[in-house]
Amino acid sequence: MELRHIWMGLGVAALVACVAATEKISEPTLKPGRVKVIYWESWTDFEAEAMQRVVDSFNRRQDKIFVEFVSTSGTEEKALMATAGGIPPDLAGLAGSSVPLYAYFQALTQLDDMCRDAGIVRDNYIPICFDLMTYKGHVYAMPTTPATTGYHYNRKILKEAGWNPDEPPRTIEELDAMDQMVMRKDKDGRVKRAGFLPAEPGWWSWSWPYFFGGRLIDANGKISTDLPANVRAYTWMQGYAKRYGVSQIQTFRQGFGQFNSPRNAFIDGTVASVIQGVWMANFIQKYNPSMDWAAAPFPYPADRPDLAGSVEIEQDCIVIPKGAKHVREAFEFLKYLQSQEGMEMLCLGQKKFSPLKQVSPEFYAKHANPFIRFFREEALSPNAFSTPRTPIWKQYGRELDVAIDKINLVTTDSPQQLLAKVRERVQPMQDEVDKIEKLRGDSAP
């Protein structure tokens, strides 16, 4: 598939609007001969402020390049449209899960040679953090802020229910038992509190197979949605719907508040434990600073102790779009960003952990998250995983979400049948990708 096809489908008007929006940014006064590098990013609020500090630091320390940081919504779509139209920014922020898609569309500048010349190598990083920036053996992006998930639990509620809060559930079976101990119903049988719900918040329902030893794409690159381990994972998930009752869970969840609010189901104690990301501490500190909570590895099946430490990791990244005017100058900023100084400035400001192997004691001393070391150590786990590295992940994810909704509704089809249908629908899409990449010679794993 060529970029011009995407460009035609997205429409000229959208691209013109995108470019016009960037032209409204006030032009800085530049020293003659100083090159301006345009950087588009979707971050807002304190996350944008953190990157602005890094940009300002880079701009102050030299006088050859000036990076202009533009915080704008829809960066990924705008960057792709602008690249298709031949007017990309010099730098753009992406979700790491989007790297395979943009690399497949040949919308990114390969960074292999520049990284090698600059001494930017995999050994400098937490391995998975670097690997997420590659596709088919080539480096297409640089990491910015990684994030792992963890089992967050309310120590006070577990203790009141009779569970030792210093020993959170280690296995899936213990998690299920804790849920039953903590669950509370009113006199009419309506659920008022849950110990755990696989569907809350529901952001990572695609990931349950990995906690049971499954995977969504097998070692041969084939769609493997209905592997036995995957079926086991979603059968476990469905068990909660059956145990609580589908209508009971629906009514219960309708009473949950917005995520970013004091009535967040975990923050207000309606659900005693959740799987959440490193950022959850920000919201706890904002809405319930006195909450007695902790974070631990998510449980594993009792018969699979080898799966201890399974954890999902994703990270934002920064890329140089194909056709950017100032590639070398843009990479000079990337070099500073990938330094310990630049990276710790960014990750400390965004309250994440650094993807670099080397971390200063000051970084931990100043960090607002009391469990930041734990979240970073999770990323080093041999069982760390991320979204499948395929250009069709968005389509695959949508198909899987439909099946998961039906699994939670306990429809007549079994989890195995629903997952098999997903594989049958998605495999032809993957076959088309494989065919095109083979014709282009993109054969690296």
Image (cartoon, helix red, strand yellow):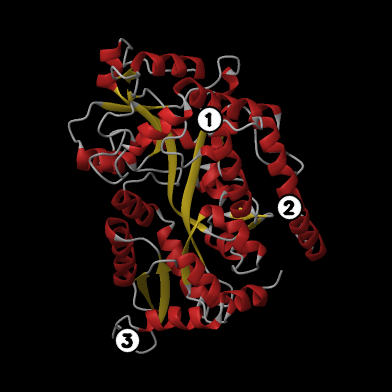
Residue depth check, mark 3 versus mark 1: number of the one nearer the observer? 1
SS at mark 3? loop
SS at mark 1? loop
Residue depth check, mark 1 versus mark 2: number of the one nearer the observer? 2
Return the residue nearer the eye: 59 or 197: 197
**Does residue 310 appear anywhere in the picture?**
yes
Dot 2 or dot 3: first in sequence order is 3
**How many C-alpha atoms fall within 10 Å of the one at disc 3: few (<14), some, or many (≥20)?**
few
With 32 as the anchor, is 79 left or right in this view?
right
Location of residue 24 in the rendering, given as x and y in whole percent from the top left corner? 33, 83
Return the residue nearer the eye: 402 or 163: 402
Image height of 308 relative to 61, above or below:
above
Determine the image quadrant of residue 152. top left
Image height of 88 relative to 202, above or below:
below
The residue that appears at 28% across and 86% down in the rendered structure is 29
Going by the numbered disc 3, the residue's amino acid type is Lys
Determine the image quadrant of residue 186. top left
Marking on residue 430? 2
Cα gap from disc 2 to disc 3, whole angstroms: 50 Å
Image height of 307 relative to 97, above or below:
above
With 230 as the anchor, is 69 left or right in this view?
left
Location of residue 168 in the rendering, given as x and y in whole percent from the top left corner? 38, 18
Residue depth check, mark 2 versus mark 3: number of the one nearer the observer? 2
Q: Which residue is mark 1?
A: 310
